[in-house]
Image (cartoon, rainbow, N blue to C red):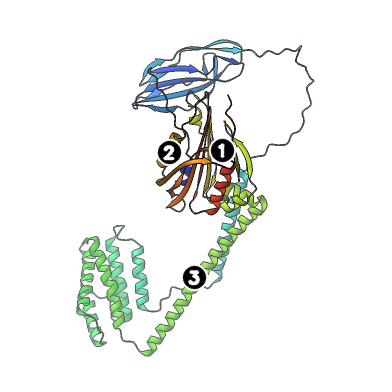
Amino acid sequence: MKKTIYFYIALLFGFLGSAQKITTAIDSSQIKIGSQFHLTIKASVNAKDKVVFPNAKNFGALEVLESYPIDTVKNNSQYELIKKYGLTQFDSGRYLIPKLMVKINQKDFQTDSLSIVVKNVKVDTTKQQMYDIKNIIATEEEPSSEWWKLLVLLGLIIASGFGSYFIIKKLQNGKVKEEEFFASPIEKAIAYLQNLDKKQLVQKGDVKEYYSEMTDIARTYIEESVHVPAMESTSSELMDALKKAISEKKMFVNREELDKFRQVLENSDLVKFAKSKPLQFEIEKDKSIVDKFILIVDKALPRTEEQAEALFAEEVRRKELKKQKFMRTAISVGIAVVLFVISVGIFAYTFGLDYLKEHHIGYTTEELLEKEWITSEYGEPAIVIETPKVLKRNNDEKIQNNLPENVKSTNRFMYGSIIDDFSIILVTTAFKDTTKLDLEAALETDLKELERFGAKNIIVKTADFENVKGLSGKKSYGSFTAFNDITKEDQKMSYEILVFAQPGGAQEFFLIYKEDDEHAKQIMEKIQNSIELRKAKK
């Protein structure tokens, strides 16, 4: 959400709808040969109406240079669809834009025919000095795009990945292959029961196979630890042999636990031979009984001192093998990380750390504060500010193509990156007349836009603004919370909105940064004190 918030900020303007179904207009009635003018067709329709605008390479004798995307403006209960074309003609004379066909719900509507005068470009050879044609001279090649640098970085990362894979593979091949080994029958039974759940046989609908494996694991354990013929016995024979062994070995096993285990064996027989289909909770209950029963039996087994020592030795060996496995995993991850860091280091050394920060990583607010700042002039009417980095123009084409009648131009400039947690947004608007923006209304509109784009819990304070250069205006400031796409959590942000106005122009200035970032606060103060305004051009 953070990036979305940084991408907003535009003045809200109202548009007057047309009472007619179709209107046609051109932005100029006279052009020079080869110059482009714009034809605009507007259709006032309902939300469910289907509109098809003309699509041709030529409108009469005029060539269509560009067909712009359709813009939509809601006007009360109706919608105004705006289609714009760029036209030209390379011969002088008067030309007629013919009536064009616009389909609305399969019904044809004709546009008005308009005329355009194409003027010839006069060249007076008696006054214009003529020169000989000069020889072709070599010029410096334009700098190519830097996409190939990304390919270099990607190639280094892939190479480090393959290198990590082969080194880890060699480490694994160089060690003695571990045999599947268990210190005792109970350890093997527990491991097999845990692995049984991982197979997800019940989820796949193979309940018969699940019960068969579960009871076989229990039978194998009983045979290996209690020493009764469990695998070849029926369920009743197994229970009789087990009770006899428990009695002879003087093992303490509760009769209730024996009855529960017998019930599991019977349920297993019903599933395997009678096609019984137990419910999910019944399956889970039977599995829990088996898990508990083998632990009770193992705890009740009588053991000699030598057997206990042997089990202890095997347990120590098992822990050592587990430790070695962990170390190999840690070494493998370490190798991968080291190779990745080396790859990024090679890239940074080749193209420079500044390139990485400028295009991919970004700068911390502390680095921005300590950098050599740049003073630049932006927009119309111009605003002069000093910033750590040059703001980049970021205009919305839809807004540019649908400016209100009294607006001459609007421009947006911004800077921001992920690591910085800091954004600067600047919007300038030039009017065709002496309109002066209502500062308080502008601040209210901007705060509503901030909320519409996802800001929550907005705390608003309003005050007059004046910097060290005597520039005055209005400001809103405070904090809000917004969802951070990287951390997946709400993040507390601070903001400050400055609005300036003069006859014929307005400037809006936005600073958004992570709360409690002291370096960001210093940057904000330094930028504010550098602001100067140029007068709007008449």
Which mark is on residue 289? none
In the image, residue 82 above or below residue 443: above
Q: Amino acid at mark 2?
A: Glu
Please name which of the two marks, 3 or 2, marks the residue nearer to the observer: 2
Q: Nearer the viewer, residue 272 or 526?
A: 526
Residue depicted at x 48% and y 20%:
40
Badge 1 vs badge 3, beta-carbon distance below 8 Å:
no
Residue at the spot of label 2: 449
Residue at the spot of label 3: 326
Please name which of the two marks, 1 or 2, marks the residue nearer to the observer: 1
Q: Nearer the viewer, residue 280 or 127?
A: 127
Circle 3: element type: helix
Residue 196 seen: yes
Residue depicted at x 31% and y 81%:
299
Circle 2: element type: helix
Q: Amino acid at mark 3?
A: Phe
Disc 3 crowd, CA 10 A, few/some/many (<14, 14-19, 20+): few
Circle 1: element type: loop
Q: Earlier in the sequence, mark 1 or mark 2?
A: 2
Outermost residue toward the top in this view: 94
Q: Earlier in the sequence, mark 3 or mark 2?
A: 3
Disc 2 crowd, CA 10 A, few/some/many (<14, 14-19, 20+): some
Q: Is residue 112 left or right of residue 94?
A: left
What's the CA distance linking mark 1 and mark 3? 64 Å
Quadrant (top left, top right, bottom left, bottom right) of the C terminus: top right
Q: Position of residue 234 (x, y in %)?
A: 23, 74
Residue 364 seen: no
Disc 1 crowd, CA 10 A, few/some/many (<14, 14-19, 20+): some
Residue at the spot of label 1: 471
Q: Position of residue 345 (x, y in %)?
A: 63, 56
Q: Amino acid at mark 1?
A: Leu
